[in-house]
Image (cartoon, rainbow, N blue to C red):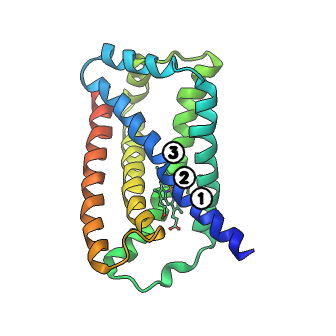
């Protein structure tokens, strides 16, 4: 029983980086083509759409890993009382923010997938620059996307920090401090890429 829980927690941790984290980087990079021109974005988006084994990739590399990570993530948020770990003030805050950003990210991803990928699948919308331009022209939706993207990039970068601890890569206080700065740089870089793309659509 305990072994099983250990295994699921390790799988949860791993999936947060591979493939979900990698997919996030790829997705935000493709979006960033919007910062060059609508045509660049359409070219990049249609290239992704034309990949071979598209449905298998979407299901096994994106949907199922996120579903597993999100379901266990919600369970962890609701049940884990492990915030009594003796960390400093800063790390306790990061621990709490990891959970809050996980929930915001879940709501955002669910809505985002519904209004883009699922609508495209149903044939009610067409993939392209104009689709995102339409969505983001509403100031409320723009604010929601801004919150959603920053929440996701924070969750990913701060998750990288705890991933390194979970897998025993950063053990000493010194290496964990270095990881704090490294993941801060990851957060700033990935957030810049994600947010710059949002502004390109308006
Ligand atoms: C793009 C989407 C997401 C990415 C890239 C991502 C990435 C990560 C990463 C890298 C970790 C660190 C794993 C570790 O501590 O070893 C993590 C932890 C966590 N994630 Fe996510 N995640 C995403 C979505 C979600 C969602 C939707 C939820 C749902 C609530 C969630 C809940 C959590 C929780 C609770 C933890 C902390 C686990 C712990 O401290 O033991 N995540 N995530």
Q: Residue at horizontal 50%, vertical 53%? A: 16
Q: Residue at horizontal 42%, vertical 22%? A: 134
**x and y percent of residue 99 in the render?**
49, 64
Q: Mark 3 points at which residue?
A: 19
CB of mark 2 near ligand 1 (< 8 Å): yes
Cα–Cα span, label 1 and label 2: 6 Å
Cα–Cα span, label 2 and label 3: 6 Å
Q: Is mark 3 on a helix, strand or loop?
A: loop
| 136 relative to 102 in the view: left or right | left
Badge 1 local density, few (<14 within 10 Å), some, or many (20+)? Answer: some
Badge 3 local density, few (<14 within 10 Å), some, or many (20+)? Answer: some
| 24 relative to 194 in the view: left or right | right
Q: Residue at horizontal 64%, vertical 65%? A: 7
Cα–Cα span, label 1 and label 3: 11 Å
Q: Is mark 1 on a helix, strand or loop?
A: helix
Q: Name the residue under label 2.
A: 15
Q: Is residue 103 visible?
A: no
**Vertical comparison of 171 with 43: above or below:** below
Q: Residue at horizontal 58%, vertical 31%? A: 57
Q: Are marks 2 and 3 in contact (CB under 8 Å)?
A: yes
Q: Name the residue under label 1.
A: 11
Q: Do the residues labelled 1 and 2 touch (CB within 8 Å)?
A: yes
């Amino acid at each position: 029983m305990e072994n099983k829980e250990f295994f699921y927690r390790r799988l949860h941790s791993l999936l947060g980086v591979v493939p979900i984290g990698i997919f996030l980087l790829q997705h935000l990079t493709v979006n960033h083509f919007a910062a060059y021109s609508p045509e660049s974005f359409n070219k990049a988006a249609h290239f992704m759409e034309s990949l071979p084994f598209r449905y298998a990739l979407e299901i096994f590399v994106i949907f199922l890993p996120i579903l597993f990570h999100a379901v266990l993530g919600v369970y962890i948020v609701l049940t884990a009382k492990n915030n009594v770990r003796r960390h400093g003030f800063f790390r306790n805050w990061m621990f709490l923010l990891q959970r809050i950003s996980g929930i915001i990210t879940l709501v955002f991803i669910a809505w985002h997938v519904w209004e883009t990928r699922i609508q495209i699948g149903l044939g009610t919308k067409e993939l392209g620059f104009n689709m995102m331009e339409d969505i983001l022209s509403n100031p409320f939706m723009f604010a929601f996307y801004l919150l959603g993207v920053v929440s996701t990039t924070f969750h990913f970068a701060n998750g990288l920090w705890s991933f390194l601890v979970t897998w025993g890569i950063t053990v000493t206080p010194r290496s964990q401090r270095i990881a704090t700065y490294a993941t801060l740089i990851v957060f700033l870089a990935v957030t810049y890429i994600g947010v710059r793309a949002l502004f390109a659509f308006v």
